[in-house]
Amino acid sequence: MLYKNERLDYSITMELSNYSKIFKALSNEQRLKIFMMIYKNCCAPEGSKIGAEFRFKDESPSCCVRGGLSKAFTKICDCMDISRSTVSHHFKELQNAGLITCEREGQTYICTVNEDVVEEIKDFLK
Amino acid sequence: MLYKNERLDYSITMELSNYSKIFKALSNEQRLKIFMMIYKNCCAPEGSKIGAEFRFKDESPSCCVRGGLSKAFTKICDCMDISRSTVSHHFKELQNAGLITCEREGQTYICTVNEDVVEEIKDFLK
DNA sequence: TTTAGCGTTCGACAATCATCGAACATTCGA
DNA sequence: TCGAATGTTCGATGATTGTCGAACGCTAAA
């Protein structure tokens, strides 16, 4: 897992190719679910319509540290039925698309959603 | 090209798998460009930030008929550097994802963006 | 220093995808 | 009715993807 991945260029209006990279990252259902869980558990808006099924069951709000989700990898492995190596691969894809950033926290990671990219997605087609 | 393709189920909150299908349809850059051109030329909002490069150059507003883009296939073939069979394939993918609908108009087609799906995309992450 | 936990990397494999050209079907106009 | 234009279908091919298990490296704790 990268500490800091090279970010795509999110200038005023994003390039078409950047959008297609983001959509590709979200085009696999498992990976989309991973992203939604990270998003839901640390930065989805208050009253968001995003389903409660993405919330970790036994989590207090304290699952968030410095704006990110702590132990994201472990938590997600625990509630998905795919191998750890596959989950690792999906995390990398999400990072390469610029959707998330991971930062070491002791033995595990804090995972943050890149909110400027989320804004770009929300603005798509507007 | 289908006259009417079976539509996905866009209920109140769309299933994750429907979102991933839509993102997959938009994950190829050529296909995303095709979609943007159809969208830009018939139903992008007034003052949309979507780039003018998606506008057909020699088109008057009359390129829209009954809410759709007339001769979409021909026009798009003319300004993209891929074969007609590939363009046909991409149109099918966009239709299967529920993003567009095509209707015969004499020898060619009127192509319509499904605006309820566009709304779902705009609402994603909200 | 040893061990256990966390996550990565590697190599493999089957499945899917993007693309092409050729052949075909349909429709309109001459 | 014939020819041209429009778009589809087919089969092929190389590239990419999603997934796995095994082996590995790093970190924290005993």
Image (tube, coloured by chain):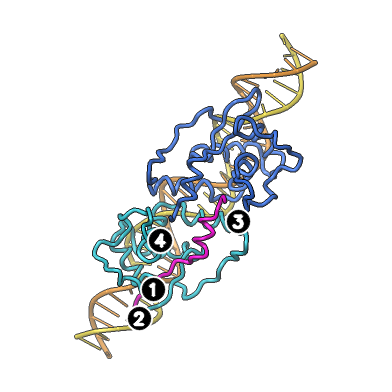
Chain colours: A blue, B cyan, C yellow, D orange
Tag 4–tag 1 contact (CB < 8 Å): no
Q: What is the x, y in percent for residue C16?
A: 53, 55
Residue beneath label 2, please? B106
Q: Amino acid at mark 1?
A: Ile
Residue beneath label 3, please? B17
Front one among A21 and D9:
A21
Dot 4 or dot 3: first in sequence order is 3
Q: What is the CA distance from the residue labelled 3 to the residue labelled 2? A: 36 Å
B125 part of magenta stretch? yes
In the rendered structure, the residue with mark 4 lies on which chain? B
A88 part of magenta stretch? no
At 65% from the left and 32% from the top, the residue drawn is: A70
Q: Amino acid at mark 3?
A: Ser
At 44% from the left and 56% from the top, the residue drawn is: A125
Front one among B20 and B48:
B48
- On residue B45, the disc is 4
> Helix, strand, or loop for circle 1?
strand
Dot 1 or dot 3: first in sequence order is 3
Q: What is the CA distance from the residue labelled 4 to the residue labelled 3? A: 27 Å
Residue beneath label 1, please? B110
